[in-house]
Image: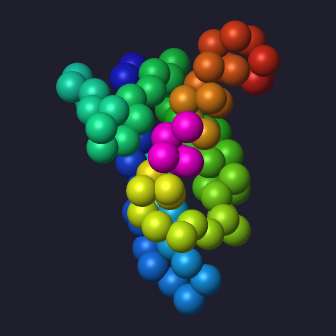
Amino acid sequence: MRYQLGWSTLPGLKGISVSEFRLTPTDAPDNERGVAMEFADQRECEAFLREIESAFARRWFTNAADAFDTVKAWALERLGKKRDGLVS
């Protein structure tokens, strides 16, 4: 099933953080506002969400564009590794 990855970008004292990652089923992916991804089942979705929350839990960014680009690149790289069989 195809999902759209989204998240919240929040300002803080240390900079900008990203959190509240979510995967929403979609028939019309939009890579300009997030990342379109495919998962086999709900278990796979939940595992991905735990992993991305952990990866960005303590990261801070200087601006929203950097945060967006970094999250998008991380998710696409992770998806590519999964497809190549490098991630369980």
Asked whether, in this view, residue 37 is left or right of residue 55, the answer is: left
Residue at position x 74%, y 12% in the image: 85
* Picture layout, residue 88 above or below residue 34: above
Estimate the x, y position of residue 13 in percent, counting from the top left: 56, 89
* Picture layout, residue 51 above or below residue 53: above
71 in the magenta segment: yes
Residue at position x 51%, y 84% in the image: 12
Asked whether, in this view, residue 87 is left or right of residue 3, the answer is: right
Asked whether, in this view, residue 20 is left or right of residue 24, the answer is: right
* Picture layout, residue 84 above or below residue 11: above
Residue with the most extreme bottom position: 13
On the rendered image, what quadrant is the C terminus found in? top right
Q: Main secondary structure of the magenta part?
A: helix
Residue at position x 78%, y 18% in the image: 86
Asked where in the image residue 47 lies, by quadrant, the reply is top right
Looking at this view, is 56 or 47 the one in front?
Answer: 56
Looking at this view, is 18 or 54 the one in front?
Answer: 18
Span colored in magenta: 69-73
* Picture layout, residue 52 above or below residue 28: below
Asked where in the image residue 37 lies, by quadrant, the reply is top left
Residue with the most extreme left position: 28
